Image (cartoon, helix red, strand yellow):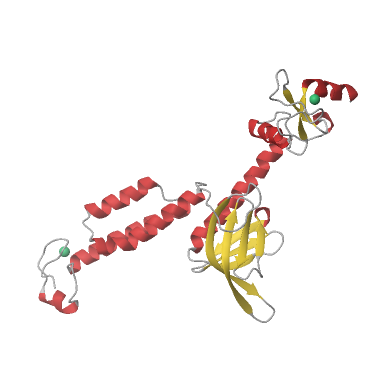
């Protein structure tokens, strides 16, 4: 056993040794450490609720712990929540990256999380606990059970409030079935689901705005050209041939309410486009 405090170097008093044989810090230091950690925990929680934990705040806390000479073994209790709230903050700010999922995805669908989960299947008289995987993509939250039965898909546009407890996330829906899932990191998954739903709603808004504009953004232009194999939808002339320029054409004319969407756009060569507008 140590004979002096590892923080301030003061020799232990007899009573200190008797009270706790394994102690590494004196009573006074322990009180100070406790106070410092408590203060930072308060700051962490309030800042997380208000705006999220930035890397600056993370650095400030780490520097302060070193500065105040907090023994490593005591730092863990603040560093663990700090690290996890820091990651969750980034997710909340929309800084998420796609992952390679094991589950089967739709065309162009992007997965963002895939975690082990237990689905609470509420039956009339009892609750069944179904083991499986919870998947979050840019379109849906899906539970895929290990047996293949009892799967549950929630489209992002139907997601309402998402709650969490110490072991579960509960997804409420505005339409269709929601669900309760037991996961390892409920707050993390809740935040992911909210961010995916928010991004989805933003995307729909942007698409609607775009559809109502005659202007066709580059990415949509590229998609249309891909859809028609870089050819004229009228005569099949290739855009790669000399002298052939492909133009974007609204199948139902924009003036008649035709939107600027992938479905309502086609690529036409100059002559075909002229022929079509003469007919209208
Ligand atoms: Zn001390
Ligand atoms: Zn043509």
In the figure, residue 30 lies in which quadrant? bottom left
Name the residue nearer the viewer: 56 or 266. Answer: 266
Note whether 102 is above or below 203 in the view shown: below
Residue found at x 70% / y 22%: 241
Q: Quadrant of the C terminus?
A: top right
Seen as rendered, the residue at the extreme front is: 241
Q: How many numbered callouts?
A: 0
Note whether 148 is above or below 154 in the view shown: below
Seen as rendered, the residue at the extreme bottom is: 125
Residue found at x 82% / y 30%: 253
User: Where does the image place residue 11, in percent across and percent down from the top left?
Assistant: 9, 67
Name the residue nearer the viewer: 201 or 144. Answer: 144
122 with respect to 45 (left or right): right
Residue found at x 49% / y 51%: 91
Name the residue nearer the viewer: 265 or 253. Answer: 265
236 with respect to 115 (left or right): right
User: Where does the image place residue 90, in percent across and percent down from the top left?
Assistant: 46, 49
In the figure, residue 41 lies in which quadrant? bottom left
Q: Can the viewer see residue 47? A: no
User: Where does the image place residue 194, in percent across and percent down from the top left?
Assistant: 57, 54
103 with respect to 228 (left or right): left
Q: Quadrant of the N terminus?
A: bottom left
- Ligand 2: image quarter: top right
User: Where does the image place residue 240, in percent across and percent down from the top left?
Assistant: 68, 24
Seen as rendered, the residue at the extreme right is: 279
Note whether 130 is above or below 50 in the view shown: below
């Amino acid at each position: 056993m140590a004979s002096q405090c590892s923080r301030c170097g003061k020799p232990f008093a007899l009573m200190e040794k008797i009270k706790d044989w394994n102690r590494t810090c004196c009573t006074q230091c322990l009180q100070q450490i406790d106070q410092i950690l408590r203060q930072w925990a308060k700051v962490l929680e309030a800042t997380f609720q208000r705006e999220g934990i930035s890397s600056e705040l993370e650095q400030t806390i780490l520097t302060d712990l070193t500065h105040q000479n907090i023994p490593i073994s005591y730092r863990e209790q603040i560093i663990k929540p700090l690290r996890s709230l820091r990651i969750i903050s980034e997710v909340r700010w929309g800084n998420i990256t796609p992952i390679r999922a094991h589950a089967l995805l739709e065309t162009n669908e992007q997965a963002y999380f895939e975690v082990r989960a237990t689905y609470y299947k509420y039956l009339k008289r009892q609750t069944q606990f179904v083991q499986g995987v919870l998947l979050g993509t840019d379109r849906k939250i899906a539970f895929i059970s290990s047996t293949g039965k009892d799967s549950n898909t929630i489209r992002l546009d139907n997601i309402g409030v998402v709650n969490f407890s110490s072991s579960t996330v509960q997804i409420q829906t505005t339409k269709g079935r929601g669900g309760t899932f037991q996961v390892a990191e409920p707050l993390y998954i809740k935040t992911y689901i909210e961010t995916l739903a928010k991004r989805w709603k933003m995307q729909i808004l942007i698409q609607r705005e775009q559809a109502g504009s005659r202007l066709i953004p580059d990415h949509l232009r590229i998609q249309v050209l891909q859809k028609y194999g870089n050819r004229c939808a009228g005569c099949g002339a290739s855009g790669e041939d000399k002298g052939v320029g492909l133009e974007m054409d609204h199948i139902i004319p924009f003036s008649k309410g035709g939107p600027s969407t992938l479905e309502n756009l086609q690529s036409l060569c100059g002559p075909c486009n002229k022929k079509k507008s003469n007919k209208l």
